[in-house]
Amino acid sequence: MNKTLRSLAAAALSAAGLLAVVSMPAGAASKSVTCYELSPKTDKLVTRHVPARKVHGRVLAARCPSGYSSHKPDLQGTGNPGDIDQKVPGAVELQINGSSFDAPEVGATTSGSTAYSAGGDVTFSSYAAAGSGTGRTAITSNPPTVNIGFSDQPMTPTAGTLPAGATEANYAQVPYILGGAVVGYNLGAGLDNLKLTAAEIAAIYNGTITTWSNSQIVATNGGASTPIGKALTNLGTNNEPRNTIKVFYRSASSGTTYAFTDFLNRAGSSGITASGNVMEGSGNKWAATNISGAANNAAMAQGIVNTLGSIGYVEYSYVLIPGNDAIQVAQLQDKNGAWLSPSLANIANAATAAGSSITPDSFSIVDEPGTNVWPLATYSWAIVAKTQTSETTGEAVVKYLDWETHYAQVVDATANGYVPLPAAVAAYARAQLETVTYNGTVLLNQSS
Amino acid sequence: MVLLPDLQQHDEEVAEYNSATSSRSWYHNLLVAVALVFTLISVAFVATILWSSRSAWSSVSTLIGGRGWQSPTGPFGGLAMIVGTLETSIIALAIAVVIGLGTSIAIVFLIPRRLRTIVATCVELLAAVPSIVYGIWGLLVLAPFMLNTVDPWLNSWPLAQYIFGSPGQEFGTSLLLAAIVLAVMILPTFVAISREVISAVPQELMEASLSLGATRWQMIREVVLPTARIGLFGATFLSLARATGETVAVALVAGGVANVQFHLLYPGTSIASWIATEFGEAQGNEVAALMALGILLMVISFALSLVSRWLVNRQRKVLAMV
Amino acid sequence: MTNIDELTPVEDGHEMRALIRRTSNNQRARRVLISRVMMTLCAVAIAIAIVPLALLVYQLLRRGIPVLSTTFFTKLPESPSLTAPNATGGVSNAIIGSLALNIYASMMAIPIGVLAGVYLAESNSKLASTLRVIAQTMAGAPSILMGLFAFSLFVQDIKIGFTAIDGSFALAVLMLPVIAISSEISVRNVPNTLREAGLALGAKPHKISMKVVLPSALTGIVTGVILALSRAVGETAPVLLVIGGGYLNTWKPLDPVSALPLMIYTNAKSEWPSLRAEVWGIALVLVVVIFVLSLGARLWASRKQQVRN
């Protein structure tokens, strides 16, 4: 009898236990979670299904182990395996041309070891860097001669940068890189870090100041008693050939020129608004008579290096190139009047001061208020057609730009002499890229 | 005596045979067709460029006489290019003719016969060096040398300011540099042709003058050069033609500034080099203007070619008479 | 002189004769001096002529040889960056591009040029004399005009874009007159005896032309073709405007291509010292190729001439 009772009790207990287990509420099952690997090591995103935990009899939601998260990470633009920016449907060669301002970055991301290649599927034509104007006309021509046109200014009618016959709404304009232009000159030893006000530079390009020993320049540099002031005055008294200022301008439509003219207008009250023309002096001609043209930033840099007494304006990374050490960089004033030498830090400050709502209608970050703000900073843009005619080309185009604005920026920009895009601007870039479609499908989201 | 009528009859038969059959052979037709194709291509050469340039001819005076080239809308003035072409070519020709004449005289009269073929081959090989190579040599080697060494010396000449310009305004690449590079480029061509022309002067003439007691130089100056004169003029025009058409070398070293420039150490441009440098970003009307500049270049080149051909033919006749 | 002495024995004839002799000796001395000076000047001229050309060859060798390497010949070009300022890659796309352009150009120019030259040599018609003038004029035309022609025809009218075919056509138009003129000269130089022998054997004129004249003229024709080719290989201006500066190694006629002279022109103005240095290597390759072609053509022609003689 005892044996029977005991076995009955055991059976009842196990039945109850079973019932209890079976009747456990469904909520407990829902507390298990799918965990995604945060930084995948292989091409496949590893997922783990983690069941709910039981702690002290209560069912708690599952927790993901470290290195995993319950939120599916957006790998796009991270450069990690699984990043869909690295997948395009087929092989394609993209044609590119445009601004020489971002030529070093474009070159580094389109050829060589740091290039975007989508597993070898995407190659790029050699970047001719013919100037922002060429970038704009090439992308808007019929048929377009490039897949991506690079221009330091976006195309808008108000800025004067929209080529005739083109419709702004047909193009997605994407901020590509952030950098600064500098005023370079070549006077030789003992005359480094010359201070030049924007008004003086405007006067030089205007032909009103024609010699380095001009009293205004001497005064700005501390007067005739300081070493630099004395050296400048001596150039005049010794009648040296390098005393005559030889002015370099850009002989093709240039975005760097636009930013430069904008700077001269805002900071130097030159009275001439930038309008996208080749020469931006009054009457579309620089009034300086002792003047010579350079086709792009590279030619301008070479010109300054080879000509004693010359002055010009180039993008910052060009003065960092070995072999261009002869280019001396002038100090410019920020809005508070402090004298600055260009650096990536104060170019970044210009972007911060300008705020993060950068759109084609408000793109200029020249002469921003604040301390330690470089007055000649500018974004550079990549322009693509909103309606692509080929799926492979279209995907390659948007994915390259997304990769560049999110991944390559962070990794390479500083090394190439640029400042990475602020996060908000990069987000704006992605939003613009998402407007690019092929047959109605948004190309950026395709996982191919 | 008996054979002659037969031979003549044979010639006539052959001529008849030729005329009777050649017009029907497929071979002859093929040749004529090919000749027509060639002519067609040449006509198209002129016609397509002319057609592309049509919108620029509405303002011929600006094209030829205008001083500024305003990209991209116009006006497009070609005077700076024309003046630059003339200046660089003429100075280059002057340098090349003086040195080239001396060189070819030296080759024919000073260099021993055994070495003459080697020297002649070297000269011809140098004439085959592409102009881009001369261009980079001018830009990367000669320009710094000019800037540092030659320019200061030139600027120290009396009256230098009027010829060369004031040193404060010199950029390094200049019209004079372009002229020098052109001179080095056309020298081998000039020497090759003038050497042939000079050695073609009959031996008897030279020996006759020597036997009359003339010194070597007298023989050269009073017999050889006058006899070869027309051929030398032909060589001059051919070299001039090459200098005016030179594109990339001038593009690299002349400075590329569209200013009408009479100071030699200031930057300038030429027709061919301006077309090459501006064409890349030209649109619409500017393309037409550049094509029109091309037509100007074509006219200059064809005129020079005509003159030099006429001269070469005259030289042949002169030698035949001697 | 001694005759005069004997004929006119004048009292003060000694002084007169001495005067004449002295004057003529002085004049002769002066003429000899002038001659020596002028001949020295000519020697100086040849020295002046040699110096820049020797310097050029020296620079080519000194700066060009260090650039040549396997990477140079086999890799595609790269853009140097601040982190890798010497990473220039190679010029394989330009080598293949130049090969493609010149092969296609030869395919177009040789048949038309040679046959046109034969026609010019064997015909006296109005068309022939007109064509001769045209060919001589075109042979001296600036090469940039051929580029404008190709642009106008292919890019503006046919709207084919910037492709290898455009550049090949421009180069073909460049080679055509030169091949025609040299072919005409070669055919004319074939001795008439050969033609007459053929006629005597009863052959038809066109058979004589094809089977007797052309083979004899072949050496001269080939020499002319090679010389035209050596000019086309080095030309920048015709291809500068129309080939599109392509990046890949491609043989397709409708793709954009690069070319060796174009690569020199683009890189010479680059901001990177490593690219500017690379230019010399490309120039050296170009010059060597042209020298081999020119020398080879001449040597072959002279040997065939010796064999014939």
Image: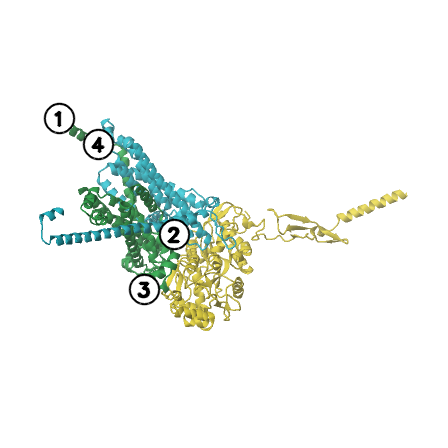
Where residue A55 sits: x, y (%)?
A: 75, 53
On the image, the x and y values in percent for residue C123 come to 23, 37
Secondary-structure class at tag 3: helix
Residue B76 in picture, x, y percent from top left = 32, 59
Q: Which chain is cyan?
A: C
Looking at the picture, tell me which residue is in the foreground, C189 or B206: B206
Dot 3: chain letter: B
Dot 2 amino acid type: Trp
Q: Are marks 4 and 3 in contact (CB under 8 Å)?
A: no
Res C161 seen here: no
Q: Which residue is mark 2?
A: B137
Q: CA distance from mark 1 to mark 4?
A: 25 Å
Name which of mark 3 and mark 2 comes first in the sequence. 2
Q: Which mark is residue B161?
A: 3
Badge 4 and badge 2 both on one subunit: yes
Chain of the residue displaying label 1: B
The answer to whether marks 3 and 2 mark residues whose Cβ atoms lie closer than 8 Å is no
Chain B: drawing colour:
green
Sequence order check: which comes first, mark 1 or mark 4?
1
Q: Quote the CA–CA distance across marks 4 and 2.
A: 56 Å
Which amino acid type corresponds to the residue marked 3 in the rendered image?
Gln
Q: Is residue B76 left or right of residue A228?
A: left
Single out the mark in the foreground, 1 or 2. 2
Relative side of B314 to B53, left or right? left
Q: Nearer the viewer, mark 3 or mark 1?
A: 3
Q: Chain of mark 2?
A: B
Mark nearer the N terminus (4 vs 2): 4
Query: In terms of depth relative to the viewer, which is nearer, C283 or A352?
Result: C283
Q: Which residue is mark 4?
A: B18
The residue under label 1 is B2
**Chosen colour scheme:** by chain
